[in-house]
Image (spheres, rainbow, N blue to C red):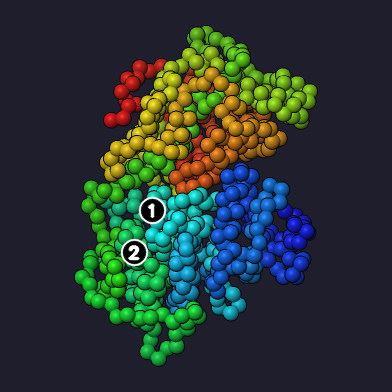
Amino acid sequence: MLAPNTILQNRYLIVRLLAQGGMGAIYEASDQRLGNTVALKETFFSDETLRHAFEREARLLARLRHPALPVVSDHFVEGNGQFLVMQFIPGNDLEQMLRHRGAPFPQNDVLVWADQLLDALDYLHTQEPPIIHRDIKPQNLKLTDRGQIILLDFGLAKGSPSQGTLATGGRSIFGYTPDYAPLEQIKAEGTDARSDLYSLAATLYTLLTGATPPGALARITSVASGQPDPLRPANEINPNLKPSVASVLMWAMAHDRNQRPASAAIMRQALGDAARAATSPGAQQRTISNEPTTVVSPPARASHPVAPPHTQQPGWPAAPQPAMQPGWPQQQQPSMPQPYYAQPARTSKAGWWVAGSLAALLLVAIIGIAVYVYNSNQSAEERAAIKVDESGKAGARALQPPNTNAPPSNELGSSEPVSGEEEIDRILDRYVEAVGGREAIESVTTRVAKGSFELPDLGVSGETEIYAKAPSKLLVVIKLPGVGVSRTGYNGATGWSQDQQTGLRKLSGNELISMKRDADFYRDVRLKELYSSLSYAGKDTINGRETYVVEAVPPEGGSEKMYFDAKTGLIIRDDAVREGLQGMTSTESYFENFKSVDGIKIPFTLRQQSALVKVVINLREVRHNVPLNDSIFNTP
């Protein structure tokens, strides 16, 4: 964190910290050259690939000019930080304002903001190439003193390679916000203009109801299990809203992007029409956007079933059932679909996507705990000492804690200063010894692990099974009750994934690289030889435990930081920034509840947090040297 009065580029004087997260910080700063106040956004990445991504996005944003968008005036790199210089917008964001109000915003105010935002999105989406924001939410909206809404935080903005192409080319240096992200963004199928419309509709829903809408993954999971979509029409929560407005929001929040408005202009037109329907005769309607909204009389459409009435929340008067709204102008756009809150069949194909998508979301976490021991933890020059207990099983030798007041040294318990390379050697060799030693590790040829997983934020849980065989075969099975089973495997040459929704597919690209790396049962090379570089980064305290920190750069790009417990020698935390389901993804993994299985220390609990999902995995049993047929790892 930058201290107040720090000067960057001999120009920008830090005034105060405005916000800080795991990937960056935003400061209020004074431009000493021009004498004005600016917002200075810093990112915490030092990887060269991410530097290039930052520069690309900075250039992309600097050319934008719209009343609802902050002006980006400069960007630079200083030390290990990358900085964007932006227009400073004083005051609280809409999420803070909503919380302080304790009640939804007035409908007319929100509709004026929506008109301004849709005009801004139309401007962004019609750029060449189109620009997709990808993180619209109340926290990224501010209101000026003159009533102009401002859309902030373009760290996610991404230019599409060409008109009509999903914006999947290139990588974003940030994640997204699951509560406001559409299904295709969570599924990593690419984002386009309709993805922003979903996020905007979810944001308007929050502002109009005071409630955060259920996330796309929670919605699809509910539908898959035979329950109604938990997304209720906004006017059922706040009966002061007109059904015409709520209907547009439901339209824009359809799971299938093809069932949403095709463009910001169409949604703007629809909300403009809904606003007229919601405004009493003679009432003055405020419009601040550059161009007036054109209203086209919509054609009638067939009605659709609606959800059964919900129990009203305390404090709200009883709300009537929403009236059926007419369809909106087509303009090569499908009519407003049957809402997803209608009761689905229990055999919905969406359920099979959940199993398959959860496999992708959970795979890294599950593999992390399954191959923790074997993930490059051998020494090429020596075997760590082990002892044999009375049962004849290999066991871990008792370790002498290091002098925690000095950097790691060449000998356990020694405090003599050593070189950076020797520090790395000592940490990694001690880790191998702490796990159980190379002989114990190489005495195992197969592993079967069974356990459960939970996504606590989504209320989703299931079972998992992991099968591994030396030298490089792996099968991960994920079972979601009431939905189905997904399998992902690697046989030493080919990676594959299978579920009922997507069928059988071959792994490629970073998916295959990750599976191949994690399928190595044990390796004859040192850990440092598997990374482009390793460096000792000093000490840190994790949950009250002192650790030695090793920074690493994987050959496929990104970065990694491993925390070795100073007392036990085991890895208790791993932070990684890697190419994942949604571009460069930051993940924090915590290894807990270590148990000895055949003399090998294994973490039976893994807690992992990323922009995609929070996962908790608990193993129930781990068995070694179980006969496994090679056919289970082959492509079905």
Type of amino acid at the residue the image marks with label 1: Glu
From the top left corner, tell me how far across and down residue 327 is, in percent.
27, 72
* Nearer-N-terminus badge (1/2): 1
Secondary structure category for the residue under label 1: helix
- Amino acid type at circle 2 is Arg
At 74% from the left and 26% from the top, the residue drawn is 419
Residue picked out by circle 1: 184
Q: Is residue 482 left or right of residue 510?
A: left
Q: Which residue is mark 2?
A: 260
* Residue 121 visible in the shown view: no
Residue 171 visible in rendering? yes
User: Where is residue 559, by image quadrant?
Assistant: top right
Residue 383 found in image quarter: top right
Image quadrant where one finds the C terminus: top left
379 or 459, nearer to the observer:
379
Considering the numbered disc 2 on the image, is that residue within a helix, a strand or a loop?
A: loop
Residue 321: image x %, image y %?
28, 72
91 left or right of 489 in image: right
